[in-house]
Image (cartoon, grey):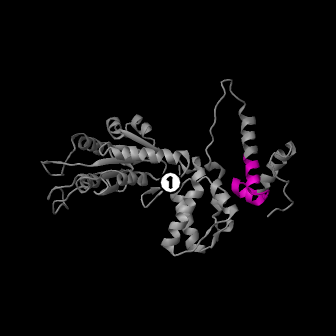
Amino acid sequence: MVWSILAGELVGETEGARALRAQIRQVAENNDATVLVTGESGTGKELTARAIHNFSARRDFPFVDISCASLPANLLESELFGFERGAFTDAGARKRGYFEMAEGGTLFLDEIAEMSTSLQAKLLRVLEQRTVRHLGGTEDLPVDVRVIAATNQDIHALMQEGKFRSDLFYRLNVVPIHLVPLRDRAGDIPLLLEHYRLRLNTLLSRNCTGFSEDAMAALCRYFWPGNVRELKNLLERILILYNPVVIELAHLAQETLSPPAAAAPFHLTLPPEGLSLAPFLASVEDELVRLAMERTAGNVTQAAKLLNVPRETLRYKLSRVLPGGGKTGTNPPGPDTP
């Protein structure tokens, strides 16, 4: 489900990408329903919001976005709702808020979970009554705005902790859209890389023609903790620093070639009958050693760096793993594999 937006198009051909495009168009047909977009940082929450706006009848009106984490609570309130002259010390003139600026269009509230609970209550009132009141004002001003909110946090956990109002959640969550991480939709990585290669060639005046087979394979294997944003930034950095005709394995950052084993999530289950912890942990360690040796083609030094252990420690672990029938899937390392 990797996708991006260029000239109003969503890029991606996996089942998830097609489903997302269909969902966005369905949501866009309704001009008023609030939307809550969730997903890890860098998965494209703002792009999703812009796509909903661009495909809706509100497209000719403003798209206004604000990060709720970028401003302290009192300043965020005045920016959202506006204020009257004299409402506070620096209020020298009347000012419209973001709700008024987005009139007829869409207001995107990014990082909504960072909003204080007191401000959440005021936002709920605006959503329910479709009016805003300036700070220091007495008049309720009608607003016609679709609100799309987004967060990368577990909002259900925040509700249980009392940090996010459940009534606001249900008011925002009329249409939920969840963006899955890049590592779970690797089939679209080549399409996304090609999309950004063409785009960055134009922006940076480069003439990169593509990727080597090894480089593409490494990029498709990478965990991408920063998701689409990290992918774009990596490609931009390569084009700026190296200006390659073809992006080769040597151009990739070491962390891209060898992502830390700890970055990959383990999906574990505990059998009803329990287990013996020490042998289980030993088997996990053996598997990580095998994967590290496989990824580095048997290079002990690189595998040790990948596992963040001294080379001598890894050689000791290999002496335990290799006699079991070549568990690493590689040839035994040489005496001083650099």
- Frontmost residue, 43 versus 293: 43
Other residues around mark 1 within 10 Å, as few (<14) / some (14–19) / many (≥20)? many
Q: Is residue 291 magenta?
A: yes
**Mark 1 highlights which residue?**
3
Task: List x then y, in percent, for residue 199.
Answer: 50, 67
The C terminus sits in image quarter: bottom right
- Frontmost residue, 44 versus 223: 44
Task: List x then y, in percent, for residue 265.
Answer: 61, 44
Toward the left, the furthest residue is 138
Q: Is residue 186 magenta?
A: no
Picture residue at 68% right of the left edge, 26% below the top: 274
Which portion, as a residue range, is magenta? 288-310
Left or right, 106 with respect to 49, comes to left
Which is the main secondary structure of the residues drawn in magenta? helix
Toward the top, the furthest residue is 273
Indicate the quadrant where residue 299 lies: bottom right
The relative height of residue 233 versus residue 203 in the rendered view (above or below) is above
- Element at label 1: loop
Left or right, 126 with respect to 171, comes to left
The amino acid type found where label 1 is placed reads Trp
- Frontmost residue, 203 versus 84: 203
The relative height of residue 174 versus residue 108 in the rendered view (above or below) is above
Q: Does residue 179 appear in the picture of this structure?
A: no
Picture residue at 30% right of the left edge, 46% below the top: 31
Task: List x then y, in percent, for residue 5.
Answer: 45, 58
The relative height of residue 88 versus residue 161 in the rendered view (above or below) is below
Looking at the rendered structure, the number of numbered marks drawn on it comes to 1
Left or right, 231 with respect to 316, comes to left
Q: Does residue 147 appear in the picture of this structure?
A: yes
Task: List x then y, in percent, for residue 120.
Answer: 30, 43
Indicate the quadrant where residue 154 lies: top left
